[in-house]
Amino acid sequence: MTHHVSTPLTHRSPIDRLLAVLSSDDTAPVARAHRFGHGDDEDDHGDADDVLARFREQARDLHERVVHDHDIFAVEFLGATGSGKTTLVERLIERTPDDERVGVVVGDVAGDDDASRFRDHGVAVANVTTGKECHLDPAMLGEAIGEFDLAALDRLYVENVGNMVCPADFPLGAQARVLVVSTTEGDDVVRKHPLLFEACDAAVINKVDVAEAVGADVSRMRTDVAELAPDMAVFETNARGGQGVDDLAAFLADVRTGGHHGHAAHEHAHD
């Protein structure tokens, strides 16, 4: 099924960390002017705060509906087009226990190529084409999962639109946000996108098998992540070959059972 959309949760939740960054004196004017089309005056800041608060509340409502009401483990994957998000989710689907049912929401500007790949794995898929929008938001996700029988799902994977900027502002209420970057994007990709790393729970450095060939220093990328988010778990993968995917799957299993702070942080966000 395809949805065409024309418009439209370290120890603190990604939602709260994101809002704290956007509220800081050093970054807020630039961030708001870029992402919300406002200027630098006080009224415009208030408008941006209202927008963020509305999306934050929608994300919490979605978290309640999916995670708590239906006991579905929800994970969002973010990253640039070509980073390997789709392949990584495919490898995770292949590692799902036989008695668990998976749903995938795919966000793309256009087309259903990724959705078709997931359908080949025999899972429920909702394809959201956003048109001019460079991200999913809670309303889009809520509409997409409305096509699922939530009572029949155990896991929900959400692949956001391929973008390293816009999705940071729009948390979707997942128990974990996983940011996927690849060596083919250059080993400075982490430093160029600090806000998105600060808004996520785990990072995947993908395509490590070709790092030498493309001149990327994986250790440098790991160091950059540690400087931005010291508590963030980092995984090195070759998603196509399966390297490192078991470690990521084990991390997500830990989040699911409450052994990692990710789920607890989302719980705290409801206080």
Image: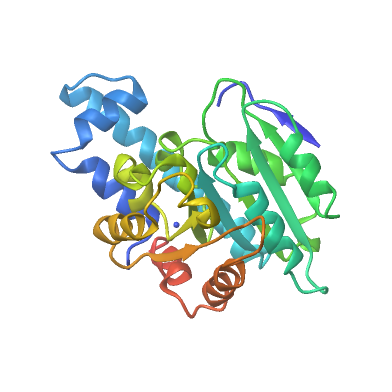
Which residue shows up at 37% across the image and 47% down it?
187
Q: Which residue is more in the foreground, 151 or 214?
A: 214
Q: Position of residue 264 (x, y in %)?
A: 43, 71
Can residue 147 be seen by looking at this rendering?
A: no
Q: Which color scheme did the rendering employ for the protein?
A: rainbow
Q: Image check: 178 left or right of 84?
A: left
Does residue 189 lie above or below 259 as drawn? above
Does residue 26 lie above or below 190 as drawn? above
Please state, as top left, top right, bottom left or bottom right, where the N terminus lies in the image.
Answer: top right
Residue closest to the far front: 213
Q: Image check: 74 left or right of 259?
A: right
Q: Which residue is more in the foreground, 201 or 38?
A: 201
Residue closest to the far left: 25
Which residue shows up at 37% across the image and 41% down it?
53
Q: How many marks?
A: 0
Can residue 226 be seen by looking at this rendering?
A: yes
Q: Image check: 45 left or right of 133?
A: left
Q: Position of residue 214 (x, y in %)?
A: 46, 44
Q: Position of residue 11 (x, y in %)?
A: 32, 68
Q: Which residue is more in the foreground, 183 or 74?
A: 183
Please state, as top left, top right, bottom left or bottom right, where the C terminus lies in the image.
Answer: bottom left
Q: Which residue is more in the foreground, 247 or 257?
A: 247
Q: Position of residue 188 (x, y in %)?
A: 33, 43
Q: Image check: 105 left or right of 47?
A: right
